[in-house]
């Protein structure tokens, strides 16, 4: 897995402080900005984070580049609806010797790992074979309709791989670019940094949090699972390690 921060709103904490102060001030926007200092921005934004006044956070965004994650993770990530996603297509990109993500528990079991890798090899073989069969059939049909050979071959490949992709596994690697506003990110972290989240997306959330915390430390000062800021909300499903979790995210 590789995660990078591609871009973000310039001076994110100043933007948030300006928006929030405007709600309670008779001053113009310019006057509001002129009154802000580095210390007042830090203090005010930290207070917003503590009390949960989150609407001003929607004014700032962060765009991430994510590589080498599974399709299983993608399905979980895109459940967070208040974000924008661009994903490497299996419909238009041929999966030649596709990479795949191996869950830790499988890595730690030689017997399970052997079965897993055998399944990945089998999926690749069937993907290649189905693509080959369909390409030939589509090329034949298109040329019979009068399409020139070069165009027919190109179109046939696209038609073939969009159907052959159905045999590809959830473990198959993909690349994603996604953009969140800061309020949506806090919600994402509260769910996916939790110990109950699946390991792969938990690791992704942790890497994303490290990146945004460098750019907006006050905004994300209490970011993480619900137990970082208050009590654990998982009830009987709690991991029972709230103190350890708080300490970890305090130092992330």
Image (cartoon, rainbow, N blue to C red):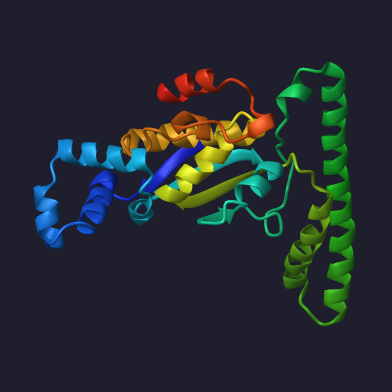
The quadrant in which residue 134 appears is: bottom right
Would residue 63 appear left or right of 81 to someone viewing this image? left
Camera-nearest residue between 41 and 74: 41
Measuring from the top left, give residue 41's x and y in whole percent.
Answer: 20, 41
User: Is residue 141 in view?
Assistant: yes
Measuring from the top left, give residue 231's x and y in whole percent.
Answer: 51, 31
Q: At x 84% / y 76%, what residue is drawn? A: 143
Outermost bottom residue: 146
Q: At x 70% / y 37%, what residue is drawn? A: 99
Task: Tell me if residue 86 comes above or below residue 98 in the rendering.
Answer: below
Task: Tell me if residue 125 comes above or below residue 92 in the rendering.
Answer: above
Quadrant housing the C terminus = top left
The quadrant in which residue 154 appears is: bottom right
Q: At x 72% / y 36%, what residue is drawn? A: 100
Measuring from the top left, give residue 223's x and y in whole percent.
Answer: 43, 35
Task: Tell me if residue 221 comes above or below residue 246 in the rendering.
Answer: below
Quadrant housing the N terminus = top right
Camera-nearest residue between 192 and 178: 192
Task: Tell me if residue 88 comes above or below residue 149 in the rendering.
Answer: above
Measuring from the top left, give residue 153's x and y in whole percent.
Answer: 77, 66
User: Is residue 252 in view?
Assistant: no
The quadrant in which residue 209 appears is: top left
Would residue 21 appear left or right of 148 to someone viewing this image? left
Number of marks present in the image shown = 0
Q: At x 74% / y 68%, what residue is drawn? A: 155
């Amino acid at each position: 897995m590789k995660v990078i921060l591609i871009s973000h709103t310039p001076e994110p904490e100043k933007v948030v402080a300006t928006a929030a102060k405007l709600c309670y001030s008779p001053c113009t926007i310019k006057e509001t900005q002129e009154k802000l200092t580095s210390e007042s921005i830090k203090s005010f934004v930290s207070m917003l984070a503590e009390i949960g006044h989150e609407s001003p956070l929607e004014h700032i965004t962060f765009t991430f580049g994510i590589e080498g994650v599974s399709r299983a993770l993608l399905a979980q990530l895109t459940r967070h609806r208040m974000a924008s996603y661009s994903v490497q297509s299996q419909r238009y990109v041929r999966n030649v010797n596709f990479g795949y993500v191996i869950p830790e528990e499988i890595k730690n079991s030689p017997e399970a790992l052997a079965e897993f890798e055998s399944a990945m090899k089998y999926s690749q073989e069937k993907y290649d074979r189905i693509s080959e069969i369909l390409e030939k059939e589509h090329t034949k049909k298109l040329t019979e309709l009068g399409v020139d050979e070069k165009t027919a071959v190109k179109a046939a490949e696209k038609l073939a791989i969009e159907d052959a992709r159905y045999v590809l596994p959830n473990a198959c690697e993909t690349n994603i670019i996604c953009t969140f506003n800061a309020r949506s990110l806090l919600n994402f972290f509260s769910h996916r940094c939790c110990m109950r989240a699946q390991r792969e997306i938990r690791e992704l959330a942790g890497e994303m949090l490290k990146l945004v915390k460098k750019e907006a430390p006050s905004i994300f000062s209490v970011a993480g699972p619900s137990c970082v800021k208050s009590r654990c909300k998982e009830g009987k499903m709690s991991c029972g390690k709230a103190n350890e979790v708080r300490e970890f995210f305090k130092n992330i």
